[in-house]
Amino acid sequence: MRVPETDEAPQVAPDTTEVVLAARNVSKSFGAVHALKGVNFDVHRGQVTTLFGENGAGKSTLMKILSGVHLPTSGELILDGEAVEIASTVEARDLGIAIIHQELSLAPNMTVRDNIFLGCEIMGSTGVNYAEEGRQARELMRELEEDIDPLTRVEDLRLGQQQIVEIARALSANSRILIMDEPTSALSASEVEVLFKVIRDLKARGVSIVYISHHLEEALTITDHAVVLRDGVMTAYAPRSEIDLEWIVRNMVGENFDIGSPPSRHEMGTTALELRGLTVPATSFTGNAVDGLDLSVKSGEVVCIYGLMGAGRTEMMECVAGRLPATAGRVLLHGQDISSFTIAQRIEAGLVLVPEDRQRDGLVQTMTVGRNLSLASISDFTRGLFTNRRDENRIIEDSIREVTVKTDGPDATIGSLSGGNQQKVVIGKMLATTPSVVVLDEPSRGIDVGAKAEVFRILAEHAKNGMAVVFSTSEVGECLSIAHRIIVMRRGRIAAEFTQDTTKEAIMAASGESLVA
Amino acid sequence: MSDTTNRAAGRPGKKGGWSIIQLLLEGRAFFGLIAIVMTFSMLSPNYATVSNFLIMSNHVAIFGLLALGMLLVILNGGIDLSVGSVLGLSGVFAGFLMQGVEIQSAGVIVYPPVWAVVVLTVALGAFVGMCNGVLVAYFKVPAFVATLGSLYVARGVALLMTDGLTFNNLSGDPALGNTGFEWLGFNRIAGVPVGVLILAVAAIVTGVILSRTAFGRWLYASGGNARAAELSGVPVRRVQVIVYSLSGVLAAFAGLVLSAQLTSAGPQAGFTYELTTIAAVVVGGASLMGGRGTVTGTLLGAFVIGFLSDGLVIIGVSSYWQTVFTGAVIVLAVMLNSIQYGGRGKT
Ligand SMILES: Nc1ncnc2c1ncn2[C@@H]1O[C@H](COP(=O)(O)OP(=O)(O)OP(=O)(O)O)[C@@H](O)[C@H]1O
Ligand SMILES: [Mg+2]
């Protein structure tokens, strides 16, 4: 039986399942920021408890408290009915609690195997037993149905594969409580399905799971309990049988709105971006990641690129932006061949990329929120030799408002923002350059429903004003939101092309994804 | 099922309390400097005198110039081990020019005027720095290795040029029109040694570059995360080349000032100065991982290191102990840096 200790917490419905781990009246402050205010939270044995909430609601903070990364400012944790203090991640591991962090915490220079067993190496008679580690790593990869050699270095993997490694690491600990903070943000639908199969297996073995995701429909298919956090306060709690999508959204943001607003029917302009026979070699295997791809996008048009992991979306986008060299083919911007342009010249010409991996490619962690936002448009506030502070602040404030970053102010450090808000900074930074063509690689990664709708609304509005928008996604639902055209990529080529009036099933089938009931 | 719309009150902005600790931490180099001056003033009556401060500030000028260049490189996420050797080479090169350059084909000896000596020497420093920068930026040689190479090459060239000897006559000859070199080392303007004035000008220029120009912003960004900076349109490689060149230029200035102060130019000048310089930058609060550090901090760092070592000499501590003290200060500074930067971002 759980009885809430403060009036702030909602009345908790009686529940018959056993609670393994509970947070009681937990608060956490970072200086003046109160991330959690008297939260009660239960983890049920052998079940999935999902935590919903907007960006910055305090979800990751609560999970970090449960897994020993942070100590709560006040309140206590109860494990198996007894109060415990979890002061470090090592202690958490000894208590059987493992976590998959939202921001990947892998050592990029080490192999997949060494990352999985980092800190809990399997010892043999003559030091680390690499053979056994390798065997177990392969076993884990097989369980996750992922074709990754355990001896590959993590930095050579794509973001989605890195996320798989992160999951494998948490699984290898054989813990009884497994916390997953947005484990699927870089996975495609079929991989999510595999993960869910693994989760069901774990449940059957009595492992308790805490799950966090901004993909609400997806989370609903796996969860047994739903808890909603809002501004650091728990606002609602219910078992799966009593809730639906609408309930979650209403409790998360206080209102309900349409996630997939249809694209506006406006006049398209001339061709803005054109790819002719673009070929980009792959980094992790021999062959081409992008194979003679032709694509043309008009001004004012929104094109969605869907595909499985490894379909070549990221490589294509990075090549368009000038990060990866093409071995053949051309990139034309408003009819001008920009194949030989540097990244800076392409930005100047009006073509920008919002990268997929915000930690590695999007943010400068040592700079403030404001300076990150203004980084790509320095020339816009440089007068002669010097930068102009007033102009810069105007650009920063405009973008904070446009992409609605939740922050203490432009001088806050990037690390103090929640994951979703960091993502918005990356998007805002590139939009601040007033581009005519914007290419976004998984722009909705880690942002909440409200923000997602907001980002898509912003993009749709820019498109109406003549911007060409190309975005990629691994969530089929997003294809059908604002895009005029949906392109399905498969093994570096265009496998199919759809207009707005298609179905999710058709898109998934074209990508080579088997449909799961 | 249960919902509430009960929300806690807003977030009261509470500050103060631990802000004293914060202040001490932020201004640690400054408070350290005050502590050093007070301690040595008590220990020796000769420390807090005008003449001693003038001597000490001449020393600080050298380290300060090197440290400003090092700061730029460190902010960019690199390291420049060649500054000590470039200083030595510059002094020797200036001395060499002052002796007159024989042009064999024409059969004449050219005595360049002092301003030309300065310009040519600075150009040499820029050239060595540019080589470092090109190696690091375009040939992907790690900064540590590239500049370690130049450390040896520059020192070796300095030894070759003088055959291991020292140029003792830098005063020039009025008849040849190349007098005035000592001006850099001995003269004062309004009571301030020229070397210190050069440092002040260099510091102001560096500060303005860092805080008010696009280049400064590029520098911080590419030092913090080169990949992200590049995707935001920062010409990361060009920035690197410029940064190492500037470090070379500042080292050349330091070499000119030092040889003018000593009125001689020896090939061993500036030996191991690169380490003292790195120490000054770190004591000034810069992060060796790149992206964090300021000009004021670095200047304070140079003063701390300079005033500390001179103070130890004045109170007669053995040079062995001086080494121990300097080492301890560096470790302490790095420790405080990691306390300050700990928990902020992953770098
Ligand atoms: N180290 C920190 N220093 C200062 N503030 C922080 C820190 N970590 C988190 N916060 C603040 O605490 C609040 C909650 O952050 P948290 O990361 O828990 O959000 P979240 O619910 O996980 O959001 P998202 O869905 O975007 O990941 C935010 O306002 C954030 O800015
Ligand atoms: Mg989070």
Image: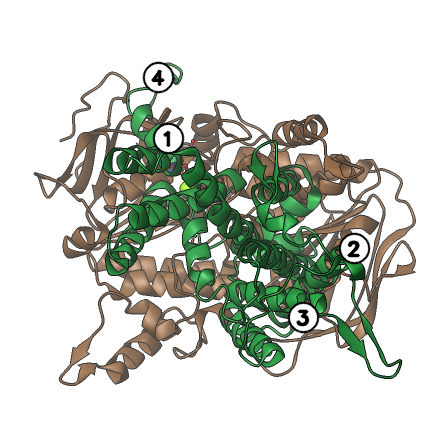
Chain colours: A brown, B green
Determine which residue is flagged by label 1: A229
Amino acid type of the residue tagged 1 in the rendering: Leu
Q: Nearer the viewer, residue A114 or A248?
A: A114
Q: Position of residue A496 (x, y in %)?
A: 73, 64
Determine which residue is flagged by label 2: A346
Left or right? Give the position of B297 relative to A112.
right
Which numbered disc flags the more N-terminal residue, 4 or 3?
A: 4
Measured in 3D between alpha carbons, the distance from the residue under mark 1 to the one under mark 2, in whole angstroms, is 42 Å
Q: Nearer the viewer, residue A19 or B343?
A: B343
Residue at 17 percent across and 44 percent down: it is A86
Label 4 chain ID: B
Measured in 3D between alpha carbons, the distance from the residue under mark 4 to the one under mark 3, in whole angstroms, is 76 Å
* Residue A204 seen in this snapshot: yes
Q: Is residue A364 above or below residue B274?
A: above
Q: Nearer the viewer, mark 4 or mark 2?
A: 2
The quarter of the picture showing ligand 1: top left
Measured in 3D between alpha carbons, the distance from the residue under mark 4 to the one under mark 1, in whole angstroms, is 12 Å
Cβ–Cβ below 8 Å for labels 4 and 2?
A: no
Element class at badge 2: helix
Q: Is residue A192 above or below residue A71?
A: below
Element class at badge 4: loop
Discs 4 and 3 carry the same chain letter: yes
Discs 3 and 2 carry the same chain letter: no
Q: Is mark 1 within 8 Å of ligand 1?
A: yes
Left or right? Give the position of B7 relative to A411.
left
Label 2 chain ID: A
Residue at 59 percent across and 69 percent down: it is B167
Q: Is mark 2 within 8 Å of ligand 1?
A: no
Amino acid type of the residue tagged 2 in the rendering: Arg
Determine which residue is flagged by label 4: B8
